[in-house]
Image (cartoon, helix red, strand yellow):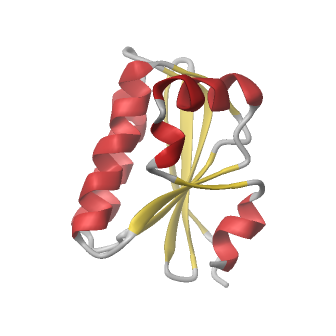
Amino acid sequence: MDRGMVGDVSRGRLEVEERRAGGSAVFTPKGELDFHTAEVLREPLDRSLDDGLSRIVVDCSQLQFCDSTGLNVLLGARLRAEAAGGGVHLAAMRSAVARVFEITGAEAVFTVHQTLADALEQ
């Protein structure tokens, strides 16, 4: 499994690390995903999808907050990934972030894993 760092992007309250692991593009957002920071995650997600990587894993273990704009970024990536035969897998969500997905019903449209290792195994 290739665990080399591909890059990282930062804008204030959100930093996103990205790497490849096997056939997956793995993103680790750190901080707050909201209206002001959504592009920090959207841009690398779009880039990976444009490059033909349709299996996306988002390691949410360091994501402290996600609002509706952040949720929409992930939903948009999911639609594109599924259209290309892949999907978006969410891993290790903190309770505050998981609650947003619960309240909106979005948890039902994503594959959610307890750990990053679980997400990478499938």
Residue 56 in percent (x, y) is at 46, 62
Q: For the N terminus, give its image quadrant.
A: bottom right
The image quadrant that residue 99 belongs to is top right
Q: Position of residue 48 (x, y in %)?
A: 34, 62
* Residue 94 visible in rendering: yes
Determine the residue positioned at 51% across, 73% down.
Answer: 24
Q: Quadrant of residue 64?
A: top right
Locate residue 15, reporting x and y percent: 56, 34
Q: Is 110 placed left or right of 99 in the picture? A: left
- Outermost residue on the top side: it is 36
Residue at the (72%, 60%) spot, across then down: 116
As drawn, 83 above or below 9 = below
Q: In the picture provided, is 5 more to the left or to the right than 39? A: right
Q: Quadrant of the C terminus?
A: bottom right
Residue nearer the viewer, 26 or 17: 26
Count of number-bearing discs: 0
Residue at the spot 48% in from the left edge and 18% down from the top edge? 67
Q: Is residue 49 above or below residue 3?
A: above
